[in-house]
Image (cartoon, coloured by chain):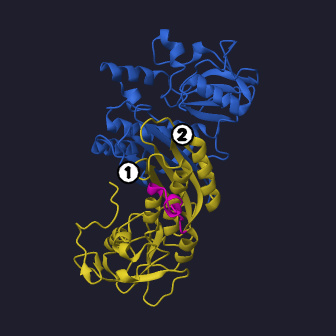
Chain colours: A yellow, B blue
Amino acid sequence: MLEFGGEALVLTHDMLVEGVHFLPGQDPADVAWKLVATNISDLAAKGAEPVGVLLGYTLGHDDQRFLEGLKAALDHYRVPLLGGDTVGGGGPQALGLTAIGRATVRPVPSRSGAKPGDALWITGTIGAAMIGLEALRSGTGDSLAYRRPQARLVEGLALAPQVTAMMDVSDGLLLDASRMAKASGITFTIDSALVPIATPEARRAEAMRWGDDYELLFTLPAGAEPAVPATMIGEAIARRESTIMLDGTPISPSEHLGFEHH
Amino acid sequence: MLEFGGEALVLTHDMLVEGVHFLPGQDPADVAWKLVATNISDLAAKGAEPVGVLLGYTLGHDDQRFLEGLKAALDHYRVPLLGGDTVGGGGPQALGLTAIGRATVRPVPSRSGAKPGDALWITGTIGAAMIGLEALRSGTGDSLAYRRPQARLVEGLALAPQVTAMMDVSDGLLLDASRMAKASGITFTIDSALVPIATPEARRAEAMRWGDDYELLFTLPAGAEPAVPATMIGEAIARRESTIMLDGTPISPSEHLGFEHH
């Protein structure tokens, strides 16, 4: 975040790497969409209106298709491409996008504001991207949620004035909730039965550890109702040894909670 | 360029790809330096003060060395790292940097403002990076100019109020001059004997077609003196068929003028 001319500029930079964040051979239009959506999702979580993006593009497999997807995504979020750089490559494709946003709420929502007693909420459902990736890999079923994730921009803007903390769930609900708890210096109790899932019931535990859904995870003071549809899944309590108590049981830090990209 | 809170934000995004913009095995600290310098150079050419950068980093060979070089370069230009993304890779390393600057002069200098009668000027000398790359490859001689290019930030800020057009010379003097001529709708006459070179005389023609020097190329009204040391190398005239007349001879568009990255 940057103070600029009396306003707060919110900047995000996310990258996608072939073989890490998207499948080799995946439709470049979908890759472009996802690149835009992940960055806009970061702005959404900060309640920032997008004002433009810069693209870092290594020439790849079907650059025309990429541009089509890029245009579709930028039109969808009504954000202009301001510039960037295009370079030759040769290895796995690496794509970077910088998104510039204008803060609509001060202080800008962050992951560090949750307080004991706050309720923990999530928009939408999780696990849809997991099912979508399986559909894409198998060639049957609906892969849209994985290929064309939706950034919760409208929801982020509506929630920003209300929340005590907010972030997008890109790497897995439990992992990202754990990060929010750590940043806020609290522990979250999460009731797994309350978590809204897009998967069969048997895959609930998995869905909570899967990323790429880009829902918004946020906290509100106890009793407050969110401005947009969302589900309450837990509560912030005073910090315990573990950052997450799942159904009353502390989660071990060594347990797999989601995607660790590094 | 973006209007923001009554100020003009200048944004640049440059990428470096291993094997394209730097040598495989090159010191990661030098690569980091160059990544910063190329972006700051873009700001310099627009007379913009740097306010911060965002880094897109694919994990590479010696990440600690990269961070050391990054810190050195950011300290050198007194610009903070605001954020970014770090991802796994596996192929040739692709690095992206977004630099955010605050315009100091309105309108912001561009490559499209040169007018017939304007004089064409360049800061410093060209060809130093070419000699530096040879030194690096051979392991003898001074490779600093290639490894740690200097962005002409102070000069760009001083020149911005004066110039009719300005850009940095990243891809070769003749190629970049040709781009400025095209954008401005004029032709440049260039006297090759006037071009300040850092190479032996025998390599003058080569030096004018070599990139990576990051000097500033700019135009001033006839008779005006630049605010910083620079050399007059030619003049803008009404548009001819060729964008460049070198020593009185039109340059063919098919001739090699510099680095075409795409």
Residue type at numbered disc 2: Thr
Up-down relation of residue B193 to residue A50 (above or below): above
Q: Residue at x 38, y 78 (%)?
A: A114
Image side of residue A66 versus residue A262, left or right = right
Q: Residue at x 22, y 72 (%)?
A: A252
Depth check, front residue: A33 or B205:
A33
Q: Could you tell me residue B23's position as x and y percent?
A: 37, 30
Image side of residue B145 versus residue B194, left or right = left
Q: Residue at x 51, y 56 (%)?
A: A34
Q: Residues within 10 Å of mark 1 (few under 14, many from 20)?
A: some
Disc assigned to residue A86: 2
Q: Could you tell me residue A119's position as x and y percent?
A: 41, 84
- Chain letter, disc 2 residue: A
Disc assigned to residue A27: none
Residue A78 shows in this picture: no
Q: Which residues are magenta?
A: A136-152
Depth check, front residue: B77 or A229:
A229
Residue A124 within the magenta-colored segment of the rendering: no
Depth check, front residue: A197 or B169:
A197
Q: Residue at x 38, y 20 (%)?
A: B134
